Amino acid sequence: MRVTDKNIKIVDFDDVLSLCSNYIKNDDSIKLITKAYDFANKCHAGQFRKSGEPYINHLLWVAYFLAQLQVGPTTIAAGLLHDSVEDCGISNTQIASEFSPDIAMLVEAVTKVTQLSEMTQEEFYAENHRKIFIAMAKDIRVILVKLADRLHNMRTLQAQPEEKRVRIARETLEVYAPIAHRLGINTIKSELEDLGLKYLEPDKYKAISSMLSQKETERKALLETMEEKIKSLLAEHKIPYRMSGRVKNIYSIYKKVFIKNRDFNEIYDLQALRIITDSETHCYEILGYIHAMYRPIPGRFKDYIAMPKPNMYQSLHTTIISDDGGIFEIQIRTEQMDQIAESGIAAHWRYKEDIVYDQKQVQKEIEEKLAWFRELVTYSSDADENAQEYMESLTKDIFDANVYVLTPKGRVLDLPNGSTPVDFAYKIHTQVGNSTIGATVNGVLVPLDTPLKTGDIVDIKTSKTNAYPKEDWLKFVKTTAARNAIKKAIIKHLSEINHDEMIDDAKRMIEETSRDLNLDVKEVIKKLENSQFLHDHNADSYEQFLIAIYSKSLNIRNIIEGFKQEEIRKAKKEKEQELILARKAKRKKEISSSHGVIVPGGETVAVSFSQCCSPIPGDEIVGYISKGQGIKIHRKDCPNIANENARLIDLSWDYDYIKQNEQNYYVDIQVSAKDRPLILVDVMNQLSSLKINVSYVNASKHGNSPIGVISLCISVKDAIQLNDVINSIKTNVKDVYDVFRYTKN
Ligand code: MN
């Protein structure tokens, strides 16, 4: 690496490789990184950054930052390739086939985040920042690549036009620095903050840095004196250690001076010293010796070893007054804690050569460790959430998470400063939060808006029946989780109230429509409540049906009009039935129902068919009034009644009755045919094929005549069918001469 100036450094691929070789020993992994470098080098050939340097320099820096965090080879490769889709038109598929789907996925996600950040309109800031959070939260590796990318972009931001500088600086302070902070990657976080400030508030940045440099010599002298004293103290007790002076974070001074209105000198006077040792026990021992030698400032001691910060930061903090009146903030921690303090989550899941990187497993562990991630992903799905409000509360959660309270069973929960028992309740479980009715802190009953302090033991009293929150709580809760849960529960509760109103409204609609259509309301409801009816209308219950009515997914007017039509149909049918019965009753007087013949004069007369001419429907008929045997029905042309005019009455068939009763009638026919063997069988077969019943058959021959006569009595429906039978025999039976009806004497 060539370092010509603090600000002008150039890394080459050998620098990246040598950093990687500190912790990546596998040849294939090194080959993968090299291949990614070659690929990127080829893609971006001829491209330059705004600053004028070759584009590949940017990618080398990104890879270099990632290697400093000791991430795995996949992530470093993704870092080298992260701009190839956006800037070189390489497809994700190409990256997937050239490298791996995993690397392609990482590049795709990083590209998406990059594209999101291109949106510039003011009103979209908040919404866009939220989307960037969400896109990155999918995979910790995406965040790491994006942080490295952003860090280098911030270092070279000067080359961008003013408008873009401000936008990127703002995005850095609102999105990337908070994420780096939450993940405990403090080296990147501090630099991002300072650079962000430099471009967003250039005057204030300059003021602070010049004030710092003015007293630089004085400060250094004070620090060196203190370092000497501590050195001898620790040497005396034979405790291994190393010391480092802390780099001042300009942004943190800016916040204290310009936002919290503190005196610059008060902050400036605070010297910072860090002692790093080999074990937790030694941390506490060192603290003991220092406290024995110097007066600690009350209330400034913090034990982040026993109670780590949510981002896993561990350290002992104390502030002491030196012999010459200087104020020193001293941090004491182990090497491992220091690594986590510097690179946070990246250190915790630091790439290990012999362990296969399981992205899902790592992501799961991260999510478990950082409830913030889960909240982020959960609430991001809430589309109604106001984006600005969301960002504000989220940033607040990220920066203020430093009150540690305990459940009665001793579980430690971290909450933002100023959190109340309600925040605590929601942190335990949404249901606990929703049904909170009171709380005790350290055994004492307190108002629900009481701010909690570290070490408080909080016990929540819940109601078993009244499980919904008060709107008032929104005025004092501090956590995003509680705020969202309360809003949700209130909306749900309101809709439950509305639910009752819906049901009432639906009932009213039913009553009004029924009255409108002149229907009995009770009868209508009875029909609606019928389980088959409900089933037919896709409702599991009457209540559900009512809601469907209210929400207009069913039209109650159509349904009730249907009932009305049904009633009208029913009435009509009843009336028809009555008419039929009446007609039947009337007809009974006129006809002899068993024969299908209409007989004027009533039912008292017995009616029967004559045996001679066997009349069938279709024949013209007359009735012969016999002596003592009622009416005999004959064909009009029957020779047996030819001279009986005085005793005859006109009759007619009742075709309705015949059709309805499928009545059959006997008729006598004769077949004349050539007298040959099997002629009878042939005639019978023909009749059988026509499904004609034969009740009598007789074959006879007159002397030596070659013609035989077959007499049959068959049943038919009417003259039409008889005609068909006659024709069929004539046509189909061989040697038949004639077929005809036959009248007995
Ligand atoms: Mn980039």
Image (cartoon, rainbow, N blue to C red):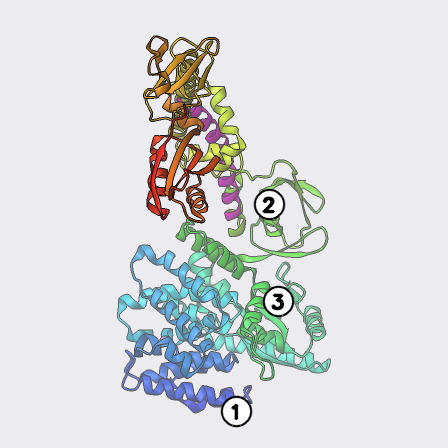
Q: Residues within 10 Å of mark 3 (few under 14, many from 20)?
A: some
Image region (quadrant) for ligand 1: bottom left
Disc 1 versus disc 3: distance between alpha carbons? Answer: 43 Å
Q: Which residue is mark 1?
A: 27
Residue 223 x, y percent position in the rendering: 55, 76
Q: Are marks 1 and 3 in contact (CB under 8 Å)?
A: no
Tag of residue 433: 2
Disc 1 versus disc 2: distance between alpha carbons? Answer: 54 Å
Q: Which residue is mark 3?
A: 317
Disc 3 versus disc 2: distance between alpha carbons? Answer: 34 Å
| Type of the residue with mark 3 | His
Which mark's residue is nearer the viewer, 3 or 2? Answer: 2
The magenta-colored residue range is 484-513
**Earlier residue among tags 1 and 3:** 1
Question: Is-magenta flag for residue 80?
Answer: no
- Decide which of 601, 232 is in the foreground and name it: 601
When the figure is inspected, residue 226 is found, relative to residue 736, above or below; the finding is: below
Q: Residues within 10 Å of mark 2 (few under 14, many from 20)?
A: many
Q: Residue at x 52, y 91 (%)?
A: 27
